[in-house]
Image (cartoon, grey):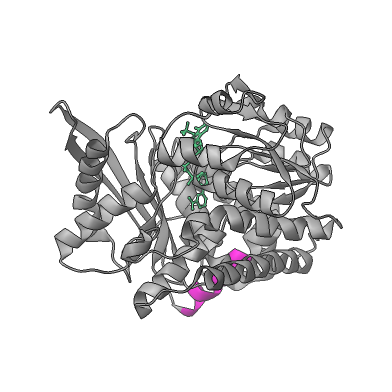
Amino acid sequence: MSKEFVERMMETVVARNPGETEFHQAVREVAESVAVVIDKNPQFAKMKIFERMVEPERQMIFRVPWMNDKNEVQVNRGFRVQFSSAIGPYKGGIRFHPSVYLGIVKFLGFEQIFKNALTTTPIGGGKGGSDFDPKGKSDNEVMRFCQAFMTELFRHVGPDTDVPAGDIGVGGREIGFMFGQYKRLTNSYTGVLTGKGLEWGGSLVRTEATGYGLVYFVTRMLEAKGKSWKGLDVVVSGSGNVAIYAVEKAHQLGARVVAVSDSNGYIVDSKGINIDTVKQIKEVERGRIKEYVQRHPSAKYHEGCADIWSVPCQVALPSATQNEIDEAAARQLVKNGCLAVGEGANMPSTPEAIQVFLDNNVAFGPAKAANAGGVATSALEMCQNSMRLSWTFEEVDARLKLIMNSIYEQCTKAADAYGQKGNLVAGANIAGFLKVAKAMMAQGLV
Ligand code: NDP
């Protein structure tokens, strides 16, 4: 029955969403995990819970016209997919990257449903983005684009409806420009976006949250193997928001991060990556990671980012983009003695890579669970905005730690309960699915 359920589901999803390969990949992974739950709970099959979950409640695709610095008209495409409001307002980031199309936004939005359910906070799932590339654009161009994007998006979002945040290519600068435009269009000052600046409604720890949360989660995975971070070598891909704060926290806990990357290449610094230099290059100067070696001549730069997984490490934290670890890279990591992989990015490991990790007793923390600290802290930002007050760094960080611990517990318990002890992929999918499924059952056919 389980296998038949998965194949029937996939046949429908592929036929109804042609060409959206990342979305198909994300749905298949969840379907494979929850088939056993649906088997045991015929009421979910009868009410077509999974069939409803794979169909977004609403999806918007819109034109984004804007003017570049040479006074030339540019046309981009904007997306917002509101997947599920079963347990709260839609919540999920906005990605600006030339590779963005509907299939990417839908894979991210679908994952977000279950991730958000795991956070213990009341938020539904959604995602958005555009094929706009912020790289190489002036601040004024980015501002004009963000204003044009929000000029359409504003009618679909709101603090109790849909609360977007950042993702690849969308950081504090972009959130600021979009927030300003929303405020102007609606004449209201509300927590419609998270990841805001600290002076105007943002939460302490939100910037650090995904990377720190990832390391808190992997701490539990290492503890289950009787290990701590002390003395471990770590490889982190990417050098953006998630990667930077994963490196920072791993260092604080006694590990040594030896490599980071961007989309052009990677650097290896066997003395340990100097995170202040990376922050300066990436957050302040918006430069390329290869500039690191000019400031630390003992480090080495390698063109192309795929080979980063050949750098020996005990912990790998893929934190750049989807499908960046394939089967060959996974085998290389195993061969080099990797003990644990924690996904900072969304779906960075291919299904074949995940199988290699599971078969070789590598502790594997799937994105839905391991990188949920970002959206969880966004939910804490929403909470502070509603109460019109701000918590201290220590208070938010303590809540983040509690949440990551709770996610770890939910995943291990659900995996245990369904006969998959230690499989956090199955655990995360099952625990997230059950919470949303129960809410959908309670709310009737909507
Ligand atoms: P950033 O834009 O801050 O950084 C992305 C990093 O990944 C950059 O170093 C970028 O290099 C690299 N990168 C992006 N696309 C590619 C690609 N196609 N190939 C190789 N490298 C690439 O994004 P974030 O750090 O916010 O996001 C990283 C990942 O984490 C994404 O998968 C995102 O969905 C996920 N995530 C983010 C959360 C958050 O709170 N920000 C929350 C949960 C998940 P370059 O600068 O050269 O483009």
| Residues in magenta, as a range | 431-442
- Decide whether residue 440 is among the magenta residues: yes
* Residue 47 at x, y percent in the picture: 51, 69
Q: Is residue 30 left or right of residue 68?
A: right
Q: Is residue 305 visible?
A: no
* Residue 48 at x, y percent in the picture: 51, 64
* Residue 185 at x, y percent in the picture: 15, 59
Q: Is residue 431 left or right of residue 84?
A: right
* Residue 87 at x, y percent in the picture: 46, 72
- Where, quadrant-wise, is the N terminus in this rendering? bottom right
- Where, quadrant-wise, is the C terminus in this rendering? bottom left
Label count reads 0
> Please, is residue 30 above or below residue 316 in the view?
below
Residue that protrudes farthest toward the right in the picture: 226
Q: Is residue 395 left or right of residue 365?
A: left
Q: Main secondary structure of the magenta part?
A: helix
Residue that protrudes farthest toward the top in the picture: 303
User: Which is nearer the eye, 275 or 181?
Assistant: 275
User: Which is nearer the eye, 187 or 362?
Assistant: 187
Residue that protrudes farthest toward the left in the picture: 71
Q: Residue at x 18, y 38 (%)?
A: 65
User: Which is nearer the eye, 35 or 66?
Assistant: 66
Q: Residue at x 73, y 28 (%)?
A: 310
Q: Residue at x 55, y 42 (%)?
A: 276
- Decide whether residue 92 is among the magenta residues: no
Q: Is residue 85 visible?
A: yes
Q: Residue at x 67, y 65 (%)?
A: 37
